[in-house]
Image (cartoon, helix red, strand yellow):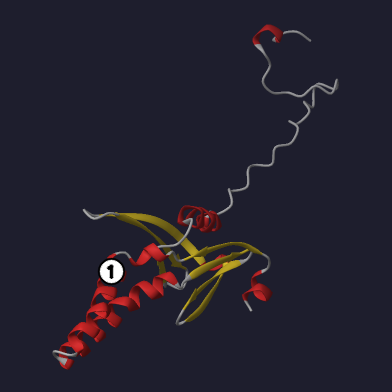
Amino acid sequence: MAEMKLGRMISVHRGTFSSGGWLWYLGGLCLVGVPFSAFRDPLLAAIAAGLGLLLLVLPIFRWRQSFDVYEEGFAWKRLTGEIIIPRDGVQSVQLVTHHSQVGSYQEVIIRLWDRRELSGRGLSDIESLANLLSSWTRTPAAPTANVSAPPVDAQNNSGQSSGWVPPNQRGQS
């Protein structure tokens, strides 16, 4: 669908499995504990299963996302649907690196002209995505003055232009 509107595909940036971080571990640990606690306390098993599934929702959403970049825009595909943004809808792009004691991760923040803000983290090759999208936000350089040949001196019919003359040629006719 996006191919028809946005032209040829340039690149694809998918969510990585590692984008879930510690939440994969904590959610998996809760789900592994369910069978062991089911015989002792079924209520505890239900709580562990619910908590485990809840903890796994965010990593699954990050893992199953992708930014498909086309010539005339991009499509952000997630489990909840697809958002198509045209190239001229991007206002600014920012690549943010978050640091903590455990590690760091990068996030690309895309501000749109309709005042929405999209945020993607845990994407493959996120630096090139940010660079590619930020190239769309740059406005073209202002047109330069019309640089044409200097006017021909009305008194000088030899075709030489009047203008700056090197010091060693001044006074020569």
Front one among 108 and 88: 108
Front one among 74 and 21: 21
- Residue plotted at (64% across, 79% down): 1
Circle 1 residues within 10 Å: few <14, some 14–19, many ≥20? some
Reply above or below: 171 against 82.
Answer: above
- Residue plotted at (16% across, 88% down): 44
State the image coordinates of residue 80 (x, y, percent, origin top left). Answer: 45, 82
Q: Residue furthest right?
A: 158
Reply above or below: 164 against 93.
Answer: above
What amino acid is at disc 1? Answer: Tyr
Q: Which residue is mark 1?
A: 25
Q: Residue furthest left?
A: 40
Q: How many badges with numbers are in the image?
A: 1
Q: Secondary structure at mark 1?
A: helix
- Residue plotted at (45% across, 66% down): 15
State the image coordinates of residue 54 (x, y, percent, origin top left). Answer: 28, 81
State the image coordinates of residue 173 (x, y, percent, origin top left). Answer: 79, 10
State the image coordinates of residue 77 (x, y, percent, origin top left). Answer: 50, 75
40 vs 124, left or right, is left
Residue 64, image quadrant: bottom left
Residue 115, image quadrant: bottom left
Residue 121 visible to an observer of this rendering: no
Residue 39 visible to an observer of this rendering: yes
